[in-house]
């Protein structure tokens, strides 16, 4: 019920913003449309989208969101990417064990290892990433995307963030 009330308030606000936008610039409407897209996407997945991923924003092109699923025993997070959003190339290091498992839960995205072709990810796709593998992952150009990121337990684990995925590399995706 609270969600319905909130959506009604957002809709009323959107109408007020549009009606008072005498220059018809639409800047505020874009923000309202973005909220609506996010809310509509949230209805399609079973895990929460979470909050803006500000802590790691410098390692992403575009907006991502982060929702902790489990922070004890096995750490798992739902990571959601707006269309065209992707993280930088990175490596999960570990003396032993370590790495990451990605489980796609909504939308459409990609995973790519350095020197290999991108792999399309749709709900149900599971990617096992061993420690030491340079890779990136993110949304398709035309779709929101969510995956559960599972941190594989290991000894002396760390992440090394590298260069962004260039627009040229990314534009080759379908």
Image: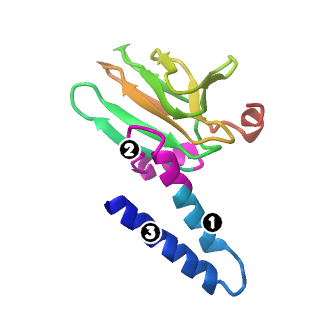
Q: Nearer the viewer, mark 3 or mark 1?
A: 3
Q: Which residue is mark 2?
A: 48
* Residue 89 in view (yes/no): no
- Classify mark 2: helix, strand or loop: loop
- Mark 3 and mark 1: Cα distance apart in space: 17 Å
Q: From the viewer's perspective, is 164 left or right of 124?
A: right
- Classify mark 1: helix, strand or loop: helix
Q: Does the residue at mark 3 contact the one at mark 1 (Cβ under 8 Å)?
A: no
Q: Which residue is mark 1?
A: 30
Residue 56, horizontal then vertical, whole percent: 46, 46
Q: Is residue 99 above or below residue 43?
A: above
Query: Farthest left residue?
Result: 72
Mark 2 closeness class: few <14, some 14–19, many ≥20 residues within 10 Å:
some
Q: Is residue 42 magenta?
A: yes
Q: From the viewer's perspective, is 103 left or right of 120?
A: left
Between disc 3 and disc 2, whose residue precedes? 3
- Mark 2 and mark 1: Cα distance apart in space: 23 Å
Q: Does the residue at mark 2 contact the one at mark 1 (Cβ under 8 Å)?
A: no
Q: Nearer the viewer, mark 3 or mark 2?
A: 3
Q: Which mark, residue 8?
A: 3
Query: Which residues lie in the magenta part?
Result: 37-62
Q: Is residue 55 magenta?
A: yes
Q: From the viewer's perspective, is 59 left or right of 143?
A: left
* Residue 2 in view (yes/no): yes
- Mark 3 and mark 2: Cα distance apart in space: 20 Å
Residue 40, horizontal then vertical, whole percent: 51, 51
Q: Is residue 77 above or below residue 135?
A: below
Identify the residue shown where x is 55% and y is 81%.
16
């Amino acid at each position: 019920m609270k969600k319905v009330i909130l959506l009604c308030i957002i809709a009323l606000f959107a109408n007020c913003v549009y009606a008072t936008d005498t220059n018809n610039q639409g800047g505020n409407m874009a923000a309202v449309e973005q909220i609506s897209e996010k809310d509509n996407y949230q209805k399609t997945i079973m895990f929460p989208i979470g909050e803006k991923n500000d802590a790691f924003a410098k390692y992403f092109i575009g907006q991502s969101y982060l929702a902790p699923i489990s922070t004890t025993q096995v750490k798992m997070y739902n990571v959601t990417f707006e269309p065209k959003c992707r993280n930088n190339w990175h490596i999960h290091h570990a003396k032993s064990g370590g790495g990451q498992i990605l489980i796609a839960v909504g939308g459409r995205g990609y995973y790519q290892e350095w020197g290999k072709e991108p792999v399309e990810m749709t709900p149900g796709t599971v990617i096992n990433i061993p420690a030491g593998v340079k890779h990136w992952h993110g949304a398709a150009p035309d779709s929101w995307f969510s995956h559960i990121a599972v941190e594989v337990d290991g000894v002396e684990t760390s992440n090394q963030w590298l260069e962004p995925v260039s627009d040229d590399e990314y534009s080759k995706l379908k």
